[in-house]
Amino acid sequence: MAEDLKMVGYMLLVIGVWFMCGILGPPGSLLRPEIVSRYGTLEMAVSISYMVMALLMLGFLLIFLGQWRAYKARSQVWRGGTHA
């Protein structure tokens, strides 16, 4: 279970970084203000950035939960308990 949480978290991070490229480069082009003013892509880039923030936040949260579950399972094994 812990490995599944971490894997999904890493996948969400990769997807978030992929969409971040679309914000800074084409089609959002926030690194080129002249393109943003010419084609009016600011609103699209802002809406995509909300999605990127959500993906990154969920990704880091799932990785944290996976690490925490793995730590709990290891500590129970060290104490002589059963697996979680």
Image (tube, helix red, strand yellow):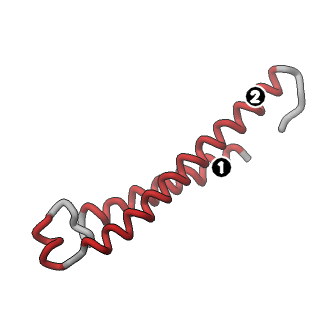
Q: Please give the residue where the numbered disc 2 appears in the rendered image.
A: 74
Using residue 14 as the reference point, say whether residue 37 is left or right of it. Answer: left
Q: Secondary structure at mark 1?
A: helix
Q: Quadrant of the C terminus?
A: top right
Q: What residue is rendered at 58% in x and 47% in y?
A: 61
User: Given the current orientation, which residue lies at the most extreme top position?
Assistant: 79
Q: What residue is rendered at 80% in x and 21% in y?
A: 78
Category of crowding for the residue at label 2, using alpha-carbon neighbours closer than 10 angstroms: few (below 14), some (14–19), many (at least 20): some
User: What amino acid is at disc 2?
Assistant: Arg
> CA separation, marks 1 and 2?
16 Å
Point out residue 65 in the picture as x, y percentages from the top left corner: 65, 43
Q: Please give the residue where the numbered disc 1 appears in the rendered image.
A: 5
Point out residue 30 in the picture as x, y percentages from the top left corner: 22, 63
User: What amino acid is at disc 1?
Assistant: Leu
User: Given the current orientation, which residue lies at the most extreme left position?
Assistant: 34
Category of crowding for the residue at label 1, using alpha-carbon neighbours closer than 10 angstroms: few (below 14), some (14–19), many (at least 20): some
Q: What residue is rendered at 49% in x and 58% in y?
A: 55
Q: Secondary structure at mark 2?
A: helix
Q: Answer with mark 1 or mark 2, whichever residue precedes in sequence.
A: 1
